[in-house]
């Protein structure tokens, strides 16, 4: 079959850099899905983007759909043929709907029942007649934020300026908001011109001639190579932050890297401030020496060629100098304020109108931090550090520096705390209590920092749930999911056996005392436990634990997270062992029968009627003794499955649901205590065995 290449480009006003990559991939995925749905074969699909365009090139597209030969299934024979032996209305209607006649009917047996079938032939349509449907793909795209322009109803990431749509050398006819498709596109805003594309395969080369590198991977590689060249020529080390590199890649169409300098006196400002000023506000790459010391230089990427780079560098230096001058002023001003003065300001800052002030939040966090420290039996030194850090953990929020650079909260708290004479452990905990700040960040290292981090995040989550702020879908304005994941990861990494239910209850008590809760504590606790289980489930999935094993360990109380994770890993490791299936079936049998026990009470050995009841009871007592000792999760699993022979023999020779009520109750009591022990490891009923 003849083939052509397909090219679609959406020309736009400059998009926010953070939207570009996902939008490019979305367009590519939608076009690929559409081609597959329409049964149009193609060889390869490539996606392109720049700040002003989203494009897709599909190579080797068939000029028509596949012809379809298929069998259509209709009613059963007894419905298709009436009592008079003639075709029924159902059979005739089915054939008409399939474009066939009753003469085409044949029968096929499915699961012992004969059904009417007819063969269908659907001739494929020409691809060019279907391609105008691309207009619907373009208008159906979604973005984190949209805008309207002029009097148009369409909401889109940015105004559409042109549409390039080619199938071979033929323009695909459609329009969006009076923008007609064509074979032309625009080059670089300042260096390029309007240009005609005659063949889709020439797209990349033609755009390069107009100073646009449409392949973002090539643009990123070019930026990286240029930065590395600058570093080699000057004996510098230029750390390349991947997030910054991605953003810069989507800010330019024709990148040229260059460097500038700033006054050495600014190096007196903390390094974090300088780097934040350069990266977050100016999109500059900081420069370091081979020893890791920050140098008074920066690297930026120009959207253009190599002409007049000296002027470009001076312009960037002027902008950065102003930014750093402000930072230096704020830094000096902050030195004049004492910590207690800053803490007093927190009393007048509302964290949330229904939750209270920052000072009230800090008070709850301090109480919860101390409860955690007591529960985990911290040393006197760690308790003292945790208490002081929790008392002053938010003081830097009212400093000039954090007001100007919110990204520096915690970092500046540590710097200023040390300057004001606080102990290093206290200062470190102030910084660490924001950790992990993102998915790539580490959890707090110190005991004080970890306890404060958990307390602060748990208070935020509990307070938000208490007033009805609960994440749903993509809506999570207070980043509660991220904070819950941070709590879980911190507890796991610190190997702290701190029951999550206790932590939730302790936080809710404090929230309730402040009169915040709109629901009962028990209702809120249930919602929070379900919320945390989803976060734990996600973490276990990342550890490649099978879904049913995750459900098993989450089937009862969460308890201590390090133990829960180890139990899940033990099940994942042992699931292919010989005898795993039989052992799980034996334990599941106990759980199933134990559900019939109403108000279980103490087991009475004197009511045992046979040796198998005694054997199982004695085995259970031995296992329970070892189980409750400091035993590894792997050993606990071994202890549980060691009961399999006694469980099997018990059920082979004992009728649990005996007619005599006293015997039945005693046997159900025995099943109940067994089930209680099994569930401490996992709800094995959730495990799928084959």
Image (tube, helix red, strand yellow):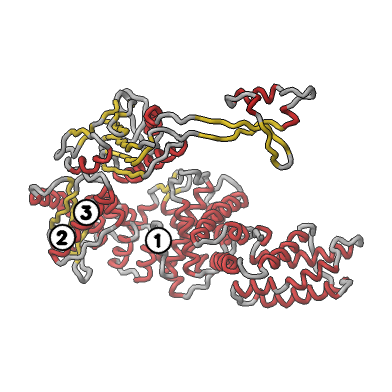
Q: Nearer the viewer, residue 583 or 80?
A: 80
The nearer-to-camera label among 1 and 3 is 3
Question: Residue 155: x percent and y percent?
Answer: 36, 31
Q: Quadrant of residue 446?
A: bottom left
Q: Is residue 63 visible?
A: yes
Q: Nearer the viewer, residue 402 or 671?
A: 671
Q: Which residue is mark 3?
A: 223
Q: Which residue is mark 1?
A: 435
In the visual, does 550 lie left or right of 161?
A: right
Question: Residue 337: x percent and y percent?
Answer: 27, 59
Question: Residue 579: x percent and y percent?
Answer: 67, 69
Dot 1 or dot 3: first in sequence order is: 3
Which residue is at the far front? 103
Residue at 16% in and 60% down? 229
Residue at 48% in and 29% down? 123
Residue at 33% in and 36% down? 4
Dot 2 or dot 1: first in sequence order is: 2
Q: Is residue 400 visible?
A: no
Distance from disc 2 to disc 3, alpha carbons, whole Å, reads 11 Å
SS under mark 2? helix
Q: Which residue is mark 2?
A: 230
Q: Nearer the viewer, residue 268 or 13?
A: 13
Q: Quadrant of residue 425?
A: bottom left
SS under mark 1? loop
Residue at 65% in and 58% down? 688
SS under mark 3? helix
Question: Residue 645: x percent and y percent?
Answer: 75, 73
Question: For the C terminus, which image quadrant?
Answer: bottom right
Q: Quadrant of residue 270?
A: bottom left
């Amino acid at each position: 079959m003849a083939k052509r290449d397909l090219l679609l480009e959406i020309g736009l006003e400059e998009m926010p850099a953070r939207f570009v990559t996902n939008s490019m991939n979305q367009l590519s995925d939608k076009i690929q899905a559409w081609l597959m749905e329409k049964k149009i074969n193609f060889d390869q699909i490539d996606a392109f983007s720049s700040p002003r365009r989203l494009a897709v090139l599909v190579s080797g597209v068939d000029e028509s759909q596949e012809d379809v030969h298929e069998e259509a299934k209709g009613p059963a024979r007894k419905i298709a043929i009436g009592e008079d032996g003639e075709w029924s209305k159902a059979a005739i209607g089915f054939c008409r709907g399939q474009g066939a006649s009753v003469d085409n009917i044949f029968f096929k047996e499915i699961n012992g029942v004969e059904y009417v079938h007819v063969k269908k032939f659907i001739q494929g349509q020409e691809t060019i007649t279907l391609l105008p449907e691309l207009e619907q793909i373009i208008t159906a795209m979604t973005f984190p934020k949209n805008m309207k322009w002029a009097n148009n109803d369409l909401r889109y990431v940015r105004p559409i300026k042109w549409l390039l749509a080619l199938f071979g050398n033929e323009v695909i006819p459609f329009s969006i908001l009076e923008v007609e498709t064509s074979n032309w596109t625009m080059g670089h805003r300042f260096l390029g011109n309007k240009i005609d594309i005659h063949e889709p395969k020439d797209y990349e080369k033609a755009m390069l001639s107009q100073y646009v590198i449409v392949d973002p991977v090539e643009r990123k590689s070019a930026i990286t190579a240029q930065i590395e060249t600058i570093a080699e020529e000057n004996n510098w080390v230029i750390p390349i932050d991947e997030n910054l590199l991605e953003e810069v890649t989507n800010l330019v169409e024709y990148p040229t890297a260059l460097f500038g300098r700033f006054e050495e006196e600014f190096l007196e400002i903390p390094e974090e401030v300088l780097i934040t000023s350069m990266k977050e506000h100016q999109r500059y790459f900081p420069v370091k020496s081979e020893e890791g010391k920050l140098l008074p230089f920066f690297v930026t990427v120009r959207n253009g060629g190599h002409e007049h780079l000296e002027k470009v560098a001076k312009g960037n230096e002027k902008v950065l100098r102003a930014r750093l001058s402000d930072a230096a002023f704020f830094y000096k001003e902050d030195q004049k304020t004492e910590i207690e003065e800053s803490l007093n300001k927190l009393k007048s800052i509302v964290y949330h109108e229904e939750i209270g002030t920052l000072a009230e939040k800090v008070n709850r966090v301090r109480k919860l931090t101390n409860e955690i420290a007591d529960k985990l039996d911290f040393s006197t030194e760690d308790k003292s550090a945790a208490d002081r850090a929790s008392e002053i953990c938010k003081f830097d929020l009212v400093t000039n520096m954090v007001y100007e650079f919110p990204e520096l909260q915690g970092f500046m708290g540590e710097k200023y705390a040390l300057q004001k004479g606080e102990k290093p452990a206290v200062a470190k905990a102030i910084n660490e209590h924001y950790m992990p700040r993102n998915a790539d960040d580490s959890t707090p290292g110190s005991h004080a920092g970890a306890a404060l981090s958990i307390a602060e995040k748990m208070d935020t989550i509990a307070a938000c749930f208490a007033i009805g702020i609960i994440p749903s879908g993509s809506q999570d304005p207070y980043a509660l999911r991220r904070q819950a994941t941070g709590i879980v990861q911190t507890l796991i990494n610190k190997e702290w056996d701190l029951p999550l239910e206790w932590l939730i209850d302790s936080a809710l008590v404090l929230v309730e005392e402040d009169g915040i809760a709109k629901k009962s504590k028990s209702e809120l606790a249930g919602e929070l436990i379900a919320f945390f289980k989803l976060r734990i489930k996600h973490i276990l999935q990342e550890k490649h634990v099978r879904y049913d094993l995750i459900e098993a360990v989450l089937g009862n109380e969460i308890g201590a997270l390090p133990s829960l994770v180890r139990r899940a890993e033990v099940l994942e490791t042992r699931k292919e062992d010989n005898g795993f299936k039989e052992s799980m079936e034996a334990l599941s049998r106990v759980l199933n029968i134990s559900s019939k026990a109403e108000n279980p009470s103490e087991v009475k050995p004197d009511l045992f009627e046979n040796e198998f009841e005694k054997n199982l009871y004695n085995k259970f007592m031995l296992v329970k003794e070892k189980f409750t000792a400091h035993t590894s999760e792997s050993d606990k699993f071994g202890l549980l499955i060691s009961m399999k022979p006694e469980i099997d023999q018990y059920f082979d020779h004992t009728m649990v649901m005996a007619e005599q009520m006293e015997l039945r109750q005693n046997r159900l009591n025995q099943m109940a205590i067994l089930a209680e022990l099994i569930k401490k490891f996992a709800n094995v009923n959730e495990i799928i065995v084959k």
